[in-house]
Image (cartoon, helix red, strand yellow):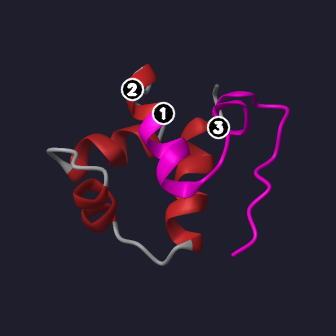
Amino acid sequence: MQRFGEKLRLLRKRHAMTLMELAEALEYGSYTRISELETGKKNPTAEFVLSVARFFNVTTDELLKDELDLNVDT
């Protein structure tokens, strides 16, 4: 799960979204928390991981398992 933040940032960038846009899309209160997740300062909740997986149409395994790379066509 150490790569979650890296994967989150990659997905956000691939969709040309800012931190604020992603926070709004996920109905998340603050983009600061997402920034902390991307940099690895905080760990995601299960609810957040599910929201990200649904929003970007990826599996939770792709997000959480460090040995798996994202398989996204964008």
- Amino acid at pointer 3: Leu
- Amino acid at pointer 2: Glu
At mark 3, the secondary structure is helix
Tell me where residue 65 sits by quadrant.
Answer: top right
Residue 65 lies, with reference to residue 58, above or below; the image says: above
Residue 63, disc: 3
Q: Where does the image place residue 3, in percent across and percent down from the top left?
A: 65, 37
Quote the CA–CA distance across marks 1 and 3.
10 Å
Residue 14 lies, with reference to residue 23, above or below; the image says: below
Is residue 71 visible in this depiction of the protein? yes
Q: Where does the image place residue 72, in percent across and percent down from the top left?
A: 74, 62
Does the CB distance between marks 2 and 1 fall below 8 Å? yes
Residue sitting at x 52%, y 73%: 15
Residue 47, disc: 2
Q: Where does the image place residue 35, in percent across and percent down from the top left?
A: 35, 48
Residue sitting at x 48%, y 33%: 50
Question: Image quadrant for the N terminus?
Answer: top right
Label 1, residues with CA under 10 Å away: few <14, some 14-19, many ≥20 = some
24 with respect to 45 (left or right): left
Please state the extent of the stretch shown in magenta in the rendering: 50-74
Is 26 included in the stretch rendered in magenta? no
Return the residue found at the far right. Answer: 67
Residue sitting at x 76%, y 51%: 70
Return the residue found at the far left. Answer: 29
Is residue 42 visible in this depiction of the protein? no
Tell me where residue 36 sits by quadrant.
Answer: top left
Q: Where does the image place residue 24, in percent across and percent down from the top left?
A: 22, 59
At mark 2, the secondary structure is helix
Of callouts 2 and 3, the N-terminal one: 2
What residue sits right under mark 1 in the picture? 50
